[in-house]
Amino acid sequence: MFEEVCKTIEEYELMDHNATVVVGVSGGPDSLALLHILHRLQSIYKLKIVAAHVDHMFRGEQSKEEMEFVLSFCRTLNIICEARQINVKAYAQKHRLNAQTAARECRYQFFQEMMEKYQAHFLALGHHGDDQIETILMRLVRGTVGKGLSGIPIKRSFAGGFIIRPLLWVTKTDIIQYCQEHKLNPRFDPSNEKDTYSRNRFRKYVLPFLKKENPKVHVHFQYFSELVAEDEQFLEELSIEKMNKVLERKTSSYVMMNLTEFKKLPSPLQRRVIHLILNYLFKGHRLTAVSSIHIEGIKKLIHQSHPSGMIDLPMGLKAIKSYETLNLTFEQHKPKPYRIQIEIPSVTNLPDGKKIICETFNGVPSYKSQDVFYLPQDQLVEPLIVRSRKAGDKIHVKGMNGTKKVKNIYIEKKIPIEKRDVWPIIEDGNGNILWIPLLKKSKYEVIDVTNQSYIVLQYKEQ
Ligand SMILES: Nc1ncnc2c1ncn2[C@@H]1O[C@H](COP(=O)(O)OP(=O)(O)OP(=O)(O)O)[C@@H](O)[C@H]1O
């Protein structure tokens, strides 16, 4: 096993000469073997080794005894040992965490502190090949997708340096044998046997079967882990590039996406782009994992034939589709309804950022367009009003008998939902809708060569 671990260290460049390495040592076989191996490499790499032990205070005297054991083991090898007792139960209660998560958080805080104290480059941990198999299988069973399926990384950034795991290519059996050969006499944590933990059930019931099928199964899982990590990194970079092309607006609580561009992406990139956006929006919301249910929900909303729709996501996030736009937003604001009187003449600023210019006009209008409306002076019923839509709004459409629902006009013209609430509607003193700028004119616009006197309304950009 020693040779195998040395090979891993070299191949993955897990160690530099003259480096300072903090080693997480629980007192169990994995980390004890790891410490022993690194100690053997100390003179070759000219390493400074610091063992770091946390007593989680779960098992009273027994865990204290483990701490004493680690301290004395390090003394015999002449290795610096930092040990700390942390009341994890109290920490878990305070932060409302389960015991395992709390223990992990406390441990990593301590490791970080030790790395800073000793200005260490590496934190070495004793995860091995069987841990890798368990982790990947547990995640598959739990429904993890993407990068999470790569399991435990052999080297990753941490506290200004790297976490390294030199034992990932060896098995628990190799480690136990190593401990026996070198008479290391490790401590065994009884909680590793409990059926209540999911990991222990995988270890006890699934691993023996896999190892019987193929004693080298850990090699295949490790290889799988590295391939997935590599593929995922490549796809993530590609997805970031594509995401930047489909995003039209982005703040910490709001994202607007162009669906015409989005739909051109191949399906795996579509999923990843959604995943990236959700991760970005949920950042800081203490949501550990974006679930595939949310990603698929958004994808379905985008591809459904109906041009508009909305789904609710965790933490009050909403995905709102409107024609070729998807808005993902935590913002709940709905535009306020408005009603403004139009003086003659005047310039009226509108909530949609545009303006209505109202003037009198003498002569026969020759310019006809959807952004200008001519009302014969003798038809004017004051006051003229510009307002937002109301339920049941109807317009007597120019050149048509009867009325038409304004709502149907918005649908026909594919006006996005969020724009409908601010779109201006002009009505007269009788409450008749005269004009919906850019969309529809009413029968009240009558241009007649015998008439030389009009009110002209123009809808313009600022
Ligand atoms: N209490 C602890 N103090 C210091 N390091 C720890 C502690 N618990 C775990 N570690 C580090 O994290 C690694 C993985 O922990 P985990 O609990 O998954 O493994 P384990 O199977 O219990 O390992 P070991 O046989 O070393 O106890 C350990 O190998 C060790 O390097």
Image: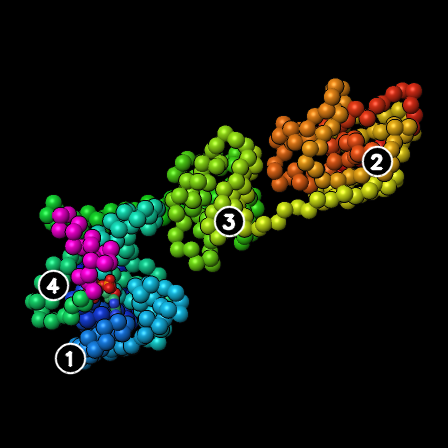
Whether ligand 1 has any atom under 8 Å from the Cβ at mark 4 is answered as no
**Quarter that holds the N terminus:** bottom left
Residue mark closest to the camera, 4 vs 2: 2
How far across and how far down the image is residue 382, in percent? Answer: 87, 36
Distance in Å between CA atoms under marks 2 and 1: 97 Å
Does residue 447 lie above or below 41 as drawn? above
Residue mark closest to the camera, 4 vs 3: 3
Query: Is mark 4 in CB contact (under 8 Å) with mark 2?
Result: no
On residue 95, the disc is: none
Residue at mark 2: 429
Residue 12 location, quadrant: bottom left
How far across and how far down the image is residue 249, in percent? Answer: 57, 46
| Mark before the other along the chain sequence, 1 or 4 | 1
Distance in Å between CA atoms under marks 3 and 2: 42 Å
Describe the element under mark 3 as helix, strand or loop.
loop
Which amino acid is tagged 2?
Gly
On residue 176, the disc is: 4
Query: Is mark 1 in CB contact (under 8 Å) with mark 4?
Result: no
Which amino acid is tagged 3?
Leu
8 vs 267, left or right, is left
Residue at mark 3: 317
Residue mark closest to the camera, 2 vs 1: 2
